[in-house]
Image: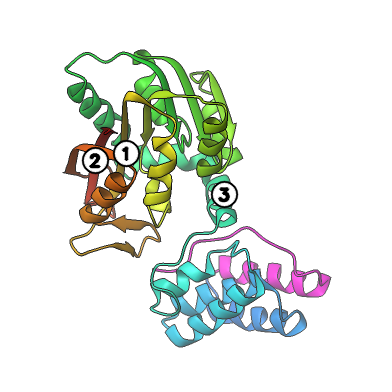
Amino acid sequence: MAAPPVLFLSSGDLIADRRYQWAMDHLTLGDLAGAADILIQAVELAPGFATAWFALGAIRDKQGDCSGAVAAFERARDSDPDDYHGARLQLARLGAGESTPEMRAVYVRRLFDQHAPRFEDSLLNRLAYSAPRKLLDAITTAAGGQLYIASMLDLGCGTGLAGAAFRPCVDWLVGVDRSGGMVEEARAKGIYDRLVVSDLVQFVADETETKTRYDLIVAADVFVYMRDLAPVACAVACILAPTGFFAFTVETHTNQGVVLAPTLRYAHSEAHVRAALADARFRAMTVDAVSTRTENGVPVSGLLAIATPE
């Protein structure tokens, strides 16, 4: 699997930047070798040009040159401490560096800002995304068949698909996402009473300070971008009403712990999910096998969890 396209970050050298754009023109025409040669010229001019190093890694990866791709991604990583391009994740995918590196906030924000305009169409029409409906059905069952929620937090709301599913059952609906592009897509739906652009854990910490409480907190396919569920589960516990529900979906695998899948999304074992909930003093009502999306037409294995405070 080749690296995804990235947004451009200037090297600060006009000639190097122009060579990068020239290389992208060759890449558009399918000339991988020519694009790689020009990118090498660019990084010779600007050795800290992270965007060019990352693009070179992606091309070498596509050419089947694993060692060359690793070398280029390492230079991209070393040139960009914030890991805007996700070079550390590509290295993990290729079996180099950390096996499950933490995703940097700037990478996740860039990823979703970049894809926001077409994200929802991709989910619904190519990936058969169903997490909001499956969460709604599961929570309705857990609540005894009739669902009324005074206040709900849509954690990692994205374009608002979960908000739209739950809106008829909720009086006060709040959405938060770290991607401003996603929040603008959600705002256009006109279904949220409050929308915030923020890091999720920081938002929950701020809500804790104001003693805000929610009767339902939902995270639909959000934690696939968080390596460890324990910190967010502990944070959520501070703002969930004593009789409230915490419900979420994750991708999963059959071994232990957390792995970074080839899709560059985390997969959490059932044991990890249960341990994170227990450490945050949640009682797991259900942790059921479910698939909420496909990948290349194949259902992706996942879990749907519903928990309440102990």
Q: Which of the two residues, 298 or 265, is positioned nearer the viewer here? A: 265
Return the mark for residue 109.
3
C-alpha separation, residue under disc 1 versus residue under disc 3: 20 Å
Q: Which residues are magenta?
A: 1-29
Q: Residue 290 location in percent, x, y?
A: 19, 43
Q: Is residue 32 above or below residue 278?
A: below
Mark 2 Cα-neighbour bin, 10 Å: few <14, some 14–19, many ≥20? many
Q: Residue at x 61, y 71 (%)?
A: 26
Q: Which mark is residue 304?
A: 2
Question: Badge 3 local density, few (<14 within 10 Å), some, or many (20+)?
Answer: some
Residue 2 in percent (x, y) is at 44, 69
Please name the residue that numbered disc 1 is placed on.
Answer: 248
What amino acid is labelled 1 in the image? Answer: Phe
Q: Quadrant of residue 307?
A: top left
Q: The residue tagged with tag 1: helix, strand or loop? A: strand
Q: Residues within 10 Å of mark 1 (few under 14, many from 20)?
A: many
